[in-house]
Amino acid sequence: MGIIRALGAVFILLLGVLAAGQDATENRYLAAIGEDGVQRAEITGGSYYFYPDVVVVKVNVPVELTVKKAGGATPHNISLQAPEAGIDFSVALRKEPKSIRFTPTKVGKFPFWCTKRFLFFKSHKDHGMMGMLEVVD
Ligand SMILES: [Cu+2]
């Protein structure tokens, strides 16, 4: 039982490494800073992607992310847990846009992904439903 579970975990890890090795085209978006000093970006999630999948924001400037779902019946979310950088959210995606507000306090690259998974199938993250928030100086 324990060994089978461990092998399963290794296999899933390998799948993840293989998937990560594929050079997917990255869609990079530099958040625009509004007159109110808030930098804004929109992210749409679908099966199995985020668009854009790389969002660049400035450190110590408030961010408003507007997130929504592209459509379809498959549930998706967007999750980024980096409390050490002032970023910590997990939001279910709907067709109606939702706003996520935070102020990044640390420069770095912070991955976000969809945490959904159907039964024993590959997780949405392993399907490529992931992206990167780049916090720059
Ligand atoms: Cu998903």
Image: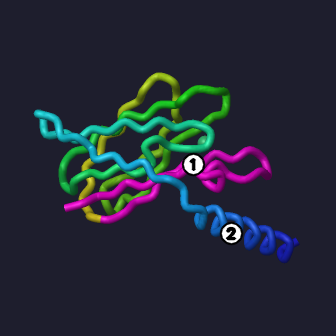
Residue 69: horizontal and vertical position, in percent? Answer: 52, 31
Give the CA distance from mark 2 to mark 1. 16 Å
State which region is magenta.
108-137
Q: Is residue 33 above or below residue 113?
A: above
Q: Is residue 103 left or right of residue 9?
A: left
From the image, tell me which residue sits under label 2. 13
Farthest residue in the top direction? 96
Which numbered disc flags the more N-terminal residue, 2 or 1? 2
Residue 109: horizontal and vertical position, in percent? Answer: 37, 63
State yes or no: residue 65 in magenta. Answer: no
Q: Is residue 112 left or right of residue 5?
A: left
Q: Is residue 66 left or right of residue 118?
A: left
From the image, tell me which residue sits under label 1. 129
Q: Where is the C terminus found, in terms of image quarters?
A: bottom left
Q: Ligand 1 quadrant?
A: top right
Q: Is residue 52 above or below residue 59?
A: above
Q: Amino acid at mark 2?
A: Leu
